[in-house]
Image (cartoon, rainbow, N blue to C red):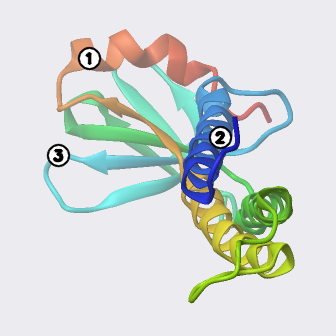
Amino acid sequence: MKLNIQQLSIIFILLLSWSQTSIAQNDEHPKEGVEYDIRVFQMDRNTSTKGIISDISEDSITIMKPKTSKKYTIPAENIKRIQITKKRKEEKSLIIGLSVGVGLGTIIGLAAGDDDEGILSFTKEQKAFSLATLFGLTGALIGGLSSSAHIKFNILGKKQNFIKHQEELIKYKKVF
């Protein structure tokens, strides 16, 4: 069974999406030695406090700004949502996506072989170049999007929601 370019392209996009999604999903649990940015969105304003978790109690969360060491304590009733993002280099995700895309595009283009003579026909090298470019750009885009993955905890100003997520949030607390 010989696969055509469209079928191979669909397989590539599915594989790349799956690989980038699985990378993002692996970030759902904190890892030792990895830093996380915490952003607390407040109920009463359209503002957020960004930093690292310094302390958590049943009633509040304390966020510290790393550059200034200034601490902000936010009561659970004032918290709309807490968002956790892994600090990582977006360039790394872009390069991984680009590399996978270029590699697969080249392999698929070369494996597809030369077209029969006709009005619109390509050599395997032309296909490899075109698909490497297309898949490389697609891979870089997916890699860039996956690098912005984050975890959300909806508190909605309810203390019981805060308490429900407290055990998970404690895992992201910075140990000084």
Q: Return the residue at label 3.
A: 43
The answer to whether mark 3 and mark 1 are in CB contact below 8 A is: no
Q: CA distance from mark 2 to mark 3?
A: 40 Å
Q: Residue at x 33, y 21 (%)?
A: 59
Kindly identify which numbered label has been placed on residue 15. Answer: 2
Amino acid marked by disc 3: Met
Residue 114: give its label: none
Residue under numbered circle 1: 161
The percent coordinates of residue 139 (x first, y second) are 66, 61
Q: Front-most of 55 and 172?
A: 172
User: Mark 1, residues whose alpha carbon is within 10 Å: few (<14), some, or many (≥20)?
Assistant: some
Neighbor class of circle 3 (other Cα within 10 Å; few <14, some 14-19, many 20+) is some
Real-space Cα distance between discs 2 and 1? 37 Å
* Between marks 2 and 1 in the image, the one whose residue lies nearer the viewer: 2
What percent of the width, then of the height, locates residue 85? 57, 46
Give the farthest residue toward the left: 44
Q: Give above or below for 140 relative to 119.
A: above
- The type of residue carrying mark 1 is Asn
Question: In this view of the protein, which residue sits in the foreground, 174 or 114?
Answer: 114
Q: Quadrant of residue 134?
A: bottom right
The crowding category of the residue bearing disc 2, from other C-alpha atoms within 10 Å (few below 14, some 14 to 19, many at least 20), is few
Query: Could you tell whether 42 is left or right of 68 in the image?
Result: left
Q: Position of residue 99 (x, y in %)?
A: 83, 63
Disc 1 is placed on an element classified as helix
